[in-house]
Amino acid sequence: MNYWLMKTEPESYSIDDLAHEKKKTTFWSGVRNYQARNFMRDDMKKGDLVLFYHSNADPPAIVGIAEVVKESYPDHTSWDENDHHYDPKSTPENPRWFMVDIKLKKKFPEALGRDQLTCVKALADMELMRKGSRLSVQPVRKKEFDAILKLASVTL
């Protein structure tokens, strides 16, 4: 099993939005960074766990856990001229962008703000904590994932 962190701006799509979906499942579309796309396309597998992170929030925070329930497939939003993720170089015949489906596993009772995370030694090498890290999809080591669960006082 792999572990991931996926960033979203809560005003665009929050963990509460995911919680209110009929099946608590959504497709993770709109990723337009090649490295993040490659993680989703090549490495994310059904059953992998995801830390759900609210970026551009006050404070930015890890707010819950989701699970990958469908492996990568072409991101249809890149073909929709009316979608703000439209990419004219991506076509159904030659897709450039991919997405996965995720399902909510657990919303944390309290958000774990980034400022809280900076004090945790087990998270010192986490990609999220790296200065200038902007990847919207990033790998997480098991020890980091476990430290987050412990901080959040949740079990799966």
Image (tube, helix red, strand yellow):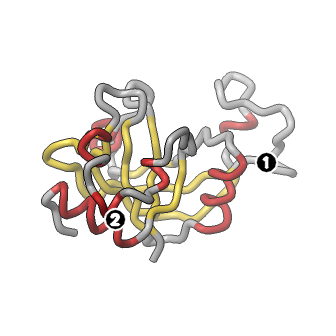
Image position of 144 (left or right of 89): left
Amino acid on which the number 1 mark rests in the picture: Arg
Q: Quadrant of the N terminus?
A: bottom left
Tag 2, which secondary structure? Answer: helix
Give the image location of residue 44, x and y in percent: 56, 66
Image position of 122 (left or right of 92): left
Residue depicted at 60% across the width and 58% down the height: 40
Give the image location of residue 110, x and y in percent: 15, 43
Give the image location of residue 123, x and y in percent: 35, 58
The answer to whether 52 is drawn above or below residue 154 in the figure is: above
Between residues 45 and 59, which one lies in front from this camera angle?
Answer: 59
The answer to whether 141 is drawn above or below residue 18 in the figure is: below
Q: Residues within 10 Å of mark 2 (few under 14, many from 20)?
A: many
Tag 1, which secondary structure? Answer: loop
Residue depicted at 67% across the width and 46% down the height: 75
Amino acid on which the number 2 mark rests in the picture: Phe
The answer to whether 111 is drawn above or below residue 94 in the figure is: above
Residue depicted at 13% across the width and 47% down the height: 109
Residue depicted at 50% across the width and 41% down the height: 131
Between residues 130 and 71, which one lies in front from this camera angle?
Answer: 130
Q: Which residue matches tag 1? A: 96
Closer to the camera: disc 1 or disc 2? 2
Q: Which residue matches tag 2? A: 145
Between residues 63 and 12, which one lies in front from this camera angle?
Answer: 63
Q: Residues within 10 Å of mark 1 (few under 14, many from 20)?
A: some
Between residues 73 and 116, which one lies in front from this camera angle?
Answer: 116
